[in-house]
Amino acid sequence: EVQLVESGGGLVQPGGSLRLSCAASGFTFNNYDMNWVRQAPGKGLEWVSYISSSAFIIYYADTVKGRFTISRDNAKNSLYLQMNSLRAEDTAVYYCARDMGSGTDYWGQGTLVTVSS
Amino acid sequence: EIVMTQSPATLSVSPGERATLSCRASQSVGSNLAWYQQKPGQAPSLLIYGASTRATGIPARFSGSGSGTEFTLTISSLQSEDFAVYYCQQYNNWPPPMYTFGQGTKLEIK
């Protein structure tokens, strides 16, 4: 069974940093590209970042470019999102999602990031 | 950036009836369109990809159609578990952003 489990969310002050993790199991992690997608409270879905299976190709949404860094450790079956210079508008549930080349077929349960003083 | 627009924002339908949800892209995405269902407190789940292909385990009452800029998700006979928020997503992939989502359609019980 495919499982994606996010962790690392919490309350952080504006300007602060946080590192999210996503532990993958039930599939061959190093065969799949991965994504982070977020959802602000009561709002819709926003794609945040993409990383290819080998980590050679990385993309970011303009809203996080220069502040967030996506990475992965295929030996640990883990995906990461380093978030720096956090703003109130980054408050959201952050999901990791497996890429199937034609959408995202599996999602974790999400981890809540709250940016507030 | 490709903008996805869903309509209506809210759709009220009775159980057993048919629901039709629309999604429009600001420029052609071919058939690179997916639909997701999201229930309260849960992550989105994939329903349809390639505009019309049902994901694994999705009941036949869900169908997708369209190409280019106009897409439709049809639920032929609504069950109680189908009342949720539905999102369309384009994955034309280049140039980034990789994916853009519509704002969602809330399907509620009439």
Image (cartoon, coloured by chain):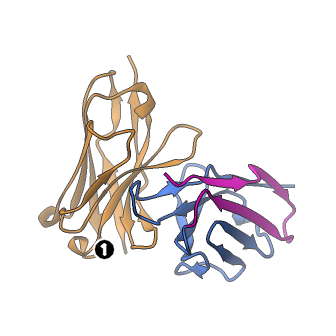
Chain colours: A orange, B blue
Return the residue found at the far top.
A117
Q: Along the horizontal axis of the image, is B84 left or right of A38?
A: right
> Residue, x 23% and y 61% (percent of image)?
A57
Callout count: 1
Residue A25, position in %: x, y? 28, 68
Label 1: which secondary element: loop
In the figure, residue A11 lies in which quadrant?
A: top left
From which residue to which does the magenta span run? B1-28
State which quadrant residue B99 falls in.
bottom left
Relative placement, left or right, of B40 versus B76 is left
Q: Residue furthest front?
A: B27
**What residue is shown at x 70% (from left), y 65% (from top)?**
B81
- Kind of residue sitting beneath label 1: Gly
Residue B106 is covered by the magenta coloring: no
Quarter of image, res B98: bottom left
Left-right relation of B12 to A25: right
Closer to the camera in the image, A20 or B22? B22
Mark yes or no: residue B63 visible: yes
x, y percent for residue A18: 26, 35
For mark 1, name the chain.
A
| Residue that extends furthest to the left in the rendered view of this protein | A75
Residue located beneath label 1 in the image: A26
**Closer-to-camera residue (A107/A43):** A43
Quadrant placement of the N terminus of chain A: bottom left
Reply yes or no: does residue B2 show up in magenta. Answer: yes
Residue B21, above or below B50: above
- Residue B68 x/y as whole percent: 61, 71
Residues packed near mark 1 inside 10 Å, few (<14), some (14 to 19) or many (20 plus) = few
